[in-house]
Image (tube, coloured by chain):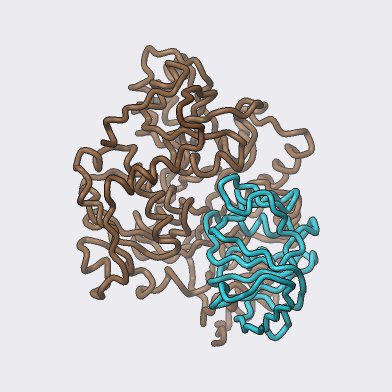
């Protein structure tokens, strides 16, 4: 199956899909030292987002999530790609700043029907297509 | 959709004000492009949330801008850092982390930002006028400046707020636009008793409910009493911006863009209406407490997220007078308010009761709470939301009066009648 996303930050990547089933603020929700979901109330608590194609239907909460994203990229613990249910200036900005700092970037796409994406290995292309299986 | 830049903005990109301003302009323009903005808007002021240490990368970013000759072009206040600079030793970082946190705070100052170190800059003299375009970071500060003061900013992430301050520009989209400021959701709290709606403790719970319900939508709230003070609106916004991505709410009859419901809705029909029932409110309140039900032990109390105002300290001093706390009691505030309460003669009595005043930072962003995690009681929806993940403490939510009574008793004392 192939979905098309709106490109927020262009790039290609591949990784296992990790779907967050509840909204998550990266600040207070992801430990930048480990890349794991650290909010004990979150359904994916304890899972690592590093190297995953991270599907986040609703980004929430703190504006410091940009800084957590930058730190994850600097430490090599970032997701391989970010699929957002709605465009979010806060997370994508962490990626833009990582590019400026020379840490590298990752693709970020806004995807209208994230829930249609089946589990499995996901490839994201520089043109914004998302392919599973 | 393409982004159109003015001649002055293009000149910045080409280095008219040096390489730091060019780098800042690249980041602002990229943020505008990815959010679909067609132009930038000139901003009058900024509040910067990038001075809290989250890792070395943020320090290197701020220091890069300093090395490149960066300087803010509009008045800019600073949010909390990771250290209490007036009371060294309160924050238990290892020396290396302390050094990096201090470097970040120093770089932020070197860029020309005012060292206010507070998440309530709007209570430290930074009060943009109604309708002003500004570039603010920190979710509670954004909610307040939009909702209570009627200035206009999006929820800017760390780094973008600083880049906006250096370029005096922000991407023109979202909450800068009239159309995006009208409410799409109505939350009707009029079914709750007036007594309940006149409690301080109601507002963080209302905010938590609002954030969970609204996500990033703008809501109009019915049933907030007309004389509701700004500390209550501050608590409402901070909680809403924790459980949701709320950047703007309208309290009908209270906040400046909502003299009545029709105005708040911009003359259109709302997409959704939600009646806030006592059961929904109790559910929202209960979600703020993560400590095991039935056990009533507490290990610490914390207030002041957002940072306590002078008025909140006066209320605390009144409740704490002649008392002696059995557990550590932290009150977080800005250094401006600390000076105010010192002058008012409140600091001595507060300390005598056992209140430890923390400035420049707070207990959920820096290791200040007792080293062995236990149960934290708070009157703050934001502390209640972030403490479990950030500090390892389980939470109990209560009113300021409950917090003081519990600190005196050394166990949870809550007036449940308030919520019935």
Q: Position of residue B261 (x, y in %)?
A: 22, 64
Q: Is residue B45 above or below residue B382?
A: below
The chain assigned the colour brown in the figure is B
Horizontal arrangement in the rendering, residue B354 relative to residue B18 (left or right): left
What residue appears at the point 52 percent right and 55 percent down from the top-left corner?
A: A61
Q: Position of residue B350 (x, y in %)?
A: 44, 20
Quadrant of residue B373 within the rendered picture:
top right
Quadrant of residue B73 within the rendered picture:
bottom right
What residue appears at the point 56 percent right and 68 percent down from the top-left corner?
A: A88
Locate the N terminus of chain B and report the quarter of the image it occupies: bottom right
Q: Nearer the viewer, residue B40 or B234?
A: B234
Q: Is residue B311 above or below residue A106?
A: above
What residue appears at the point 55 percent right and 62 percent down from the top-left corner?
A: A59
Locate the C terminus of chain B and report the quarter of the image it occupies: top left
What residue appears at the point 20 percent right and 50 percent down from the top-left corner?
A: B191
Q: Position of residue B140 (x, y in %)?
A: 46, 51
Q: Nearer the viewer, residue A65 or B372?
A: B372
* Chain A as rendered: colour: cyan
Q: Position of residue B114 (x, y in %)?
A: 56, 48
Horizontal arrangement in the rendering, residue B266 relative to residue B289 (left or right): left
Is any part of residue A86 visible from this angle? yes
Horizontal arrangement in the rendering, residue B65 relative to residue B166 (left or right): right
Q: Is residue B401 above or below residue B22?
A: above
Is any part of residue B338 visible from this angle? no
């Amino acid at each position: 199956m192939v979905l098309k996303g709106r490109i927020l930050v262009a790039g290609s990547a591949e990784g296992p899909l990790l779907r967050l089933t509840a909204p998550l603020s990266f600040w207070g929700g992801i430990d930048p030292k480990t890349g794991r979901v650290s909010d004990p109330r979150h359904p994916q608590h304890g899972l690592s987002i590093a190297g995953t194609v991270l599907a986040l239907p609703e980004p929430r909460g703190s504006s410091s999530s940009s800084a957590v994203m930058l730190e994850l990229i600097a430490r090599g613990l970032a997701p391989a790609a970010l699929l957002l249910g709605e465009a979010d200036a806060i997370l994508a900005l962490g990626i833009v700043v990582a590019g400026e700092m020379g840490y590298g970037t990752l693709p970020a796409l806004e995807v209208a029907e994230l829930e249609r994406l089946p589990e499995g290995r996901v490839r994201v292309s520089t043109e914004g297509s998302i392919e599973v299986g | 959709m393409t982004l159109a830049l003015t001649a002055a903005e293009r000149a910045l990109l080409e280095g008219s004000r040096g390489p730091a301003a060019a780098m800042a302009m690249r980041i602002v323009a990229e943020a505008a492009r990815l959010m679909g903005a067609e132009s930038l808007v000139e901003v009058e002021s900024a509040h910067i949330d990038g001075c809290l240490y989250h890792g070395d990368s943020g320090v290197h970013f701020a220091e890069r801008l300093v090395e490149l000759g960066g300087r803010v072009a509009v008045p800019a206040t600073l949010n909390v850092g990771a250290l209490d600079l007036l009371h060294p030793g309160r924050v238990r970082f290892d020396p290396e982390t302390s050094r990096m946190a201090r470097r970040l705070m120093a770089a932020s100052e070197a860029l020309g930002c005012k060292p206010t170190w507070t998440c309530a800059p709007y209570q430290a003299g930074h009060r943009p006028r109604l309708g002003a375009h500004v570039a603010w970071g920190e979710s509670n500060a954004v909610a307040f400046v939009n909702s209570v003061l009627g200035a206009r900013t999006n929820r800017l992430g760390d780094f973008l707020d600083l880049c906006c301050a250096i370029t005096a520009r922000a991407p023109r989209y979202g909450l800068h636009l009239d159309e995006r400021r009208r409410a799409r959701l109505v939350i009707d709290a009029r079914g709750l008793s007036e007594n309940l709606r006149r409690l301080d403790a109601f507002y963080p719970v209302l905010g938590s409910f609002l954030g969970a319900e609204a996500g990033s939508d703008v809501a109009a709230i019915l049933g907030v009493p007309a004389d509701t003070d700004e500390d209550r609106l501050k608590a409402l916004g901070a909680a809403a911006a924790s459980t949701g991505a709320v950047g703007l709410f309208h309290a009908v009859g209270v906040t400046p863009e909502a003299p009545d419901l029709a105005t708040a809705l911009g003359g259109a029909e709302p997409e959704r209406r939600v009646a806030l029932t006592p059961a929904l409110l109790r559910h929202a309140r209960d979600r703020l407490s993560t400590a095991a039900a039935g056990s009533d032990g507490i290990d610490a109390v914390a207030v002041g997220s957002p940072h306590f105002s002078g008025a909140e300290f006066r209320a605390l001093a009144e409740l704490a007078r002649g008392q002696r706390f059995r557990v550590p009691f932290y009150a977080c505030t800005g250094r401006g308010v600390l000076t105010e309460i010192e002058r008012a003669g409140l600091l001595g009595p507060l300390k005598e009761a056992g209140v430890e005043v923390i400035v420049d930072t707070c207990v959920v962003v820096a290791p200040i709470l007792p080293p062995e995690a236990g149960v934290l009681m708070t009157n703050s929806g934001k502390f209640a939301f972030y403490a479990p993940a950030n500090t390892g403490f389980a939470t109990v939510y209560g009113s300021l009066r409950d917090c003081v009574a519990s600190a005196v008793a050394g166990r949870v004392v809550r007036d449940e009648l308030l919520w019935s």
